[in-house]
Amino acid sequence: MKVILFGATGMVGQGVLRECLLDAGVESVLAVGRSPTGQRNAKLREIVHDNFLDFSAIESELAGFDACFFCLGVSSVGLNEERYRLLTHDITLAAATALSKLNPAMVFVYVTGRGTDSTEQGSLMWARVKGKTENDLLKLPFKAAYMFRPAGIQPLHGIKSKTGWYQAAYVAAAPLLTLLHRVAPKYVTTTEQVGRAMIKVARDGYPKPVLESEDIDRV
């Protein structure tokens, strides 16, 4: 399986990249991002790209892939709806639309979040925007598309968030996250399990397009 990964330097993306590089069934990984990952691996190739609303300049590099793992995301804190929609919906759909034209047999896996509003009508701005993003992705002509909605995510294997206060919170909450993952997996999963589940779903499929935390752990 040949994989394109967006967001490989973020916390979730780091975990997904780790699992892809460890998985014998993943032949190669193309990481597309605004900055390099800093990793060296025979299976990894990287493209540094600045304009995530226009992929025409690198289009020739984006064909011939079996799966895309889209792990880019921003917090809605401090953003108005227009800006959050640009950074969440518009960027994701620009990449997905380009990939669907180049790779009609591709499986697209998108990391969204627990509480996403599929009706697009709720009171929470971020949930509406995420819901529209999911709905629009599911309309594209991929072989299949899956929406991953983890709740809390525990970083493992030295993986860190690039956001300072997020990382401090993860460090402080590590014992609680470990306990919750054991006793209440619907509320907490891990970067390792998200990565493993993405690979499994891309390879073997899943009965429904939206996976909550408990589905991710089950996979």
Image (cartoon, rainbow, N blue to C red):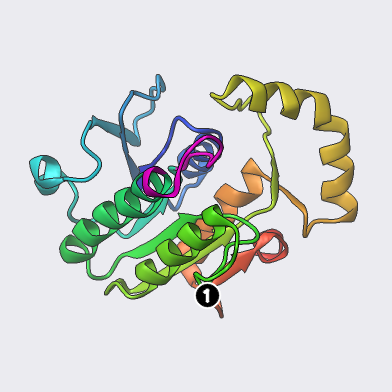
Q: Quadrant of residue 210?
A: bottom right
Return the x and y of residue 11 as percentages of the image width and height. Answer: 55, 34
Q: Is residue 59 visible?
A: yes
Q: Is residue 51 magenta?
A: no
Return the x and y of residue 31 as percentages of the image width and height. Answer: 33, 37
Find disc 1 in the rendering and name its residue. 119
Q: Is residue 77 magenta?
A: yes
x 30%, y 71%: residue: 142
Return the x and y of residue 74 as percentages of the image width and height. Answer: 48, 39
Disc 1, SS: loop
Q: Nearer the viewer, residue 121 or 207?
A: 121
Q: Is residue 213 left or right of residue 102?
A: right
x 21%, y 36%: residue: 51
- Give the residues in magenta: 73-83
Q: Nearer the viewer, residue 118 or 13?
A: 118
Q: Is residue 74 left or right of residue 43?
A: right
Return the x and y of residue 78 as percentages of the image width and height. Answer: 52, 34
